[in-house]
Image (cartoon, helix red, strand yellow):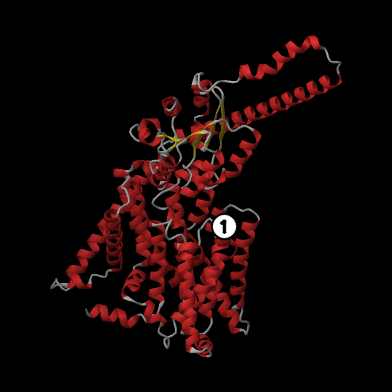
Amino acid sequence: MDLEKKQVTVTKRIMGLDGLRGLSILLVILYHFFPRVVKGGYLGVPLLFILSGYLLSSLDTKKWHRDQYSIQKFYQSRVKRIFPPLFLFTGLISLFCYLFLPRLLNGRTPEVMSAFLGYNNFWQIAQNASYFDRVSSASPFTHLWSLAIELQFYLVWPWVFVIYQKAKARGNDYRVLFLMLTGISMLCMAFGYYKGVDISILYYHTATRISAILLGVWLGLVRSSKITRFIEEFNINRLYLTFGAILAVTILAVFLLDGQNPSTYYIGLSMMTFLFGILLILAIQNHLPFGRLLDNPVLTYIGSRGYELYLWHYAVMFISNSLKIKPSFISLTIQFFIFILLAEFSYRLINNKFYFVSQWFNDETAFQQYVKKARNVLYGVSALGLGLLLVASSKADDSKSKLEADLAANSELLAKQRETAKKNQSAETTIDMTNETETTVAPIDESDDDSKAESEAEPETTTINQDSADVTQQPITLIGDSVLLGSVKEVQAAFPNAYIEAEESRQAYEVTDLFRQMIANGTMANRVVIALGTNGYFDISFGQELMDLLGPEREVYWVTVYGEFLQWEASTNQVIYELASQYPNLKIVDWESQVKNHREWIIDDGIHPDIGGRDQYARILKETIEANQP
């Protein structure tokens, strides 16, 4: 107990910061667990960045004025705080995956390395350059991108801070530069979206996300006395109104500001960053009640264990989904209990905070030795996990390179087929126009009436009657992503008259205009297969929009989604089944229920069929369509 009291007296807490940190972590956790409800929970990240920037600049300024600032000590403190929990987390998760989900470790070494070296956000941007890399890169370490941005900032901050303080000592206060850089970063995000830059780049890139940290730095460099005097100029009722308004806007944004919405990148993130800055200013004022309100027991606890909770929560959720555990109140409660327990244990073990347990031991020194041994054992186990990660990732993954080649070849094949079809259509149009011209200028010969009648009737004799002809010989349109693209040859062998429109990286939301175009130009047959959803969730309203475009006269089939580690598989398939219950002309091609019992059909990425699996894919399509014929 004496140790605990001593610790409290050494570190002077800034009121409201633990509560704000707890709020930021809570938003991120809720966003990851309930992304379609807490749509704007990602706003916890800029709030966390502001707090990091503020703490760095304000605490370092105090150390500078006391002649206690040291670049070496800064780096030592950051390394000591960041890397032991990260080492423990990545090692234990890798060990668990090696034992129970070994496929999850395929190609994971570069990702984990990027987390330790502080460039994970750029690594994730690079993965998004390719469709199958993006899908197969989903992992329990995906959330470490924000840590990378902080590490990059920590790398340069001490030198920037020293230069700033030395310039200030000579009478040049360049504090406003941090505010200007904040604005430039925000403009980069808005302008980048306007220019059509990929959302993943805008979301992950340091240049577009550093604004929150820089704003926090600027606030920390402003003397607290100046901020207090500024705040005191306002009427207390106005301050209450401001605080309440910011909380209200935050709540609305958390539930409404979707990460795919253009307004998020034009102004949403920037506006919320500034509002969080005002919230921080209000929270740290000792004479106001806002900080005490935020420092409630729940948010304070979450904030004090924020880093550990941030590390563990996503991995527990991801592994649970990868084990195909269906979301329920009980399963979610267990997941929350597990990641909180892991976070609490790692926090206490690494920081040696076992005061309540130490009271049971008469010999404090012996107890500390036990803790040290337990810590070393876990570090050893973590090292083993990372070693197994290296072994698993070093295995040659020929299926990945083979998939790349097949997708490229099939894309080229479809492009040639579309070009040929376009030329044939153009040629037919030219012939028709020529015939029309000839009949207009040529003399009428009544003796040719019979031959002309035969000529006009000829197209009808070549059109397949869907009621009588073999279903596989009838026109059919298939629209999908890389799962369909990889199976093009097998599908065309089963359906010789198929028109296939498949593309890598295709999100379901991208095909609305394509549907309209194909309906307009006549390439949308009366029988349609939709194979979308592998690359991301879509909601029921979007599915209804596609079905309404196709109309009730078309016979539509929707292929269910399968991916061993796809987090949205169950929710997307639920939408597909709901659509089938609403539209009588929509039937289900249940690829998911068939393939999940035949892992030998799928390559190592857990998503795409291998050569044998592609034959099965085409077979299931054919059998489902045949079974639904009158």
In the image, residue 227 lies at what x, y percent?
52, 85
228 or 156, nearer to the observer: 228
In the image, residue 368 lies at what x, y percent?
21, 68
Q: Residue at x 84, y 22 (%)?
A: 440
In the image, residue 117 lies at what x, y percent?
46, 56
187 or 102, nearer to the observer: 187
Picture mark count: 1
Kindly indicate the quadrant of the structure image that contains residue 376.
bottom left
Q: Residue at x 40, y 84 (%)?
A: 289
Query: The disc labelled 1 sits on which kind of residue?
Result: Leu
Residue 61 showing in the rendered view = no
> Is residue 256 placed above or below 577 in the rendered structure?
below
| Furthest residue toward front | 446
Left or right placement of residue 518 versus residue 628 in this view? right
| Furthest residue toward left | 362
Residue 473 showing in the rendered view = yes
The quadrant of the rendering that contains the C terminus is top left
In the image, residue 130 lies at what x, y percent?
54, 43
16 or 31, nearer to the observer: 31
The quadrant of the rendering that contains the N terminus is bottom left
117 or 40, nearer to the observer: 40
Q: Provide the residue designation for mark 1.
A: 202
Left or right placement of residue 463 versus residue 619 in this view? right
Q: Residue at x 46, y 61 (%)?
A: 42
> Is residue 424 placed above or below 106 in the rendered structure?
above
Q: Secondary structure at mark 1?
A: helix
Kindly indicate the quadrant of the structure image that contains residue 377.
bottom left
How many other residues sit within 10 Å of disc 1, few (<14), some (14-19) or many (≥20)? many
